Image: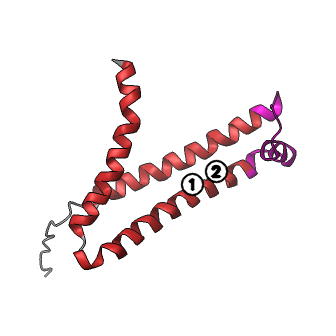
Amino acid sequence: MAYLLVVTAPATQVGRLGDMYGRMRTAAPPDRLGIASGVLRTFAGLGTVFSFTVAFLAAAHAVPRSTAFAVFVGTTSLHGADAEAFTSALSTAFYILTGVMVLAAALSAVRGRPGAVRRTTPSG
């Protein structure tokens, strides 16, 4: 059963990406599908750039310059303090990005359902 979950997990992610495009096609007017697709791909690209930037900033603050140079130039292996510093920097980046993801999920949950009408009560 565990093998089935491991095999199907990537497929579910691809399905969600396809579902995102399906929702875009039903939400956007037919004459604006190109614009909606462009906006969707732009924000996906921005998310990728943002995650790389956060990872590099976390690494730059946690890893000594010599270790960063060794990793990005292609040293075959890291040992001792260099390996520990590098994995610590990666952990820091993952924690930061997990926080961003939790914030995004919370904001998405608060925004409400698409198409729902918000009713306001007159004050006074």
- The answer to which quarter of the image holds residue 37 is bottom left
Report the span colored magenta. 60-83
- Give the secondary structure at mark 2: helix
x, y (%) of residue 21? 31, 59
At horizontal 35% and vertical 53% (from top left) the residue drawn is 106
- The residue under label 2 is which amino acid type? Ala
Q: Where the C terminus falls, by quadrant?
A: bottom left
Residue drawn 77% across and 32% down? 83
| Disc 1 target residue | 51
Residue 123 left/right relative to 39: left
Q: Residue 103: x percent and y percent?
A: 42, 54
User: Which residue bears the numbered disc 2?
Assistant: 55
> Considering depth in this image, is 56 or 25 the residue closer to the camera?
25
Q: Nearer the viewer, residue 52 or 109?
A: 52
Instruction: Report the magenta stretch's main SS.
Output: helix
Q: Do the CB atoms of the residues marked 1 and 2 lie less than 8 Å apart?
A: yes
